[in-house]
Image: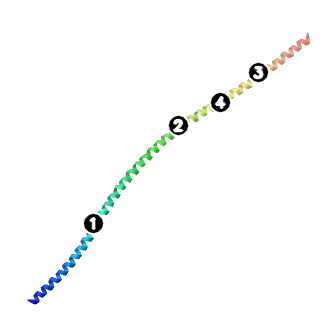
Amino acid sequence: MKAQLKRAQSSSASKTEEISALQVRLDSTTSSTSKLEQERNELTRRIKELEKKSDDDHSRFAKMLEARDTEIDSLMNEKAALMSDYQDLMDTKVALDNEIATYRKLLETEERRSRVFEILCIENQLWQSCLMLLCLLTD
């Protein structure tokens, strides 16, 4: 019986050591699991944070694109209005250039007529002077 008791005590001591070793291992695993769970929670929080930032950035960029498109449309409309005004001004310029050219021709024609008339008047005065001289000479 003593041998059985010794074996039982030895077995009991061995089991106690095994239980202690398992307890140490369990504590280590629990600590490790706790640390991993904290990391997972931190990573989950970081993922949510990044997703929110991504959504915010997406929303901000969508608004920027919409503002850009609106500005492009506005500038295109302004450009069309300016082009229309420019075309109106060019049409007016061409019409005025044509009118000036017409008046210039009329003026030049009138100046030629005036010169011809002056020449005719001078010739007429000369003829009258000649006639008067002839009349004086013949009297």
Find the distance from the CA under tag 2 to the CA under tag 4: 24 Å
Nearest to the eye among marks 4 and 3: give it.
4
> Which of the marked residues, 4 or 1, is nearer the chain's N terminus?
1
> Which of the marked residues, 1 or 3, is nearer the chain's N terminus?
1
Find the distance from the CA under tag 2 to the CA under tag 3: 49 Å
Q: Which residue is mark 1?
A: 37
Q: Is residue 113 left or right of residue 64?
A: right
Task: Look at 26% across and 71% down and name the residue there.
Answer: 31
Task: Look at 43% across and 46% down and name the residue there.
Answer: 67
> Which of the marked residues, 2 or 3, is nearer the chain's N terminus?
2
Label 1, secondary structure: give it. helix
Seen as rendered, the residue at the extreme top is: 139
Q: Quadrant of residue 29?
A: bottom left
The label on residue 84 is: 2
Check the picture and name the quadrant holding the C terminus: top right
Residue 86's spot in the image, x, y percent?
56, 37
Label 3, secondary structure: give it. helix
Find the distance from the CA under tag 1 to the CA under tag 3: 117 Å
Q: Amino acid at mark 3?
A: Phe
Nearest to the eye among marks 2 and 1: give it.
1
Seen as rendered, the residue at the extreme left is: 1
Label 2, secondary structure: give it. helix
Label 4, secondary structure: give it. helix
Q: Which residue is mark 3?
A: 117
Find the distance from the CA under tag 4 to the CA under tag 3: 25 Å
Against 49, residue 21 (above or below) is below
Q: Which residue is mark 4?
A: 100
Nearest to the eye among marks 4 and 1: give it.
1
Against 64, residue 83 (above or below) is above
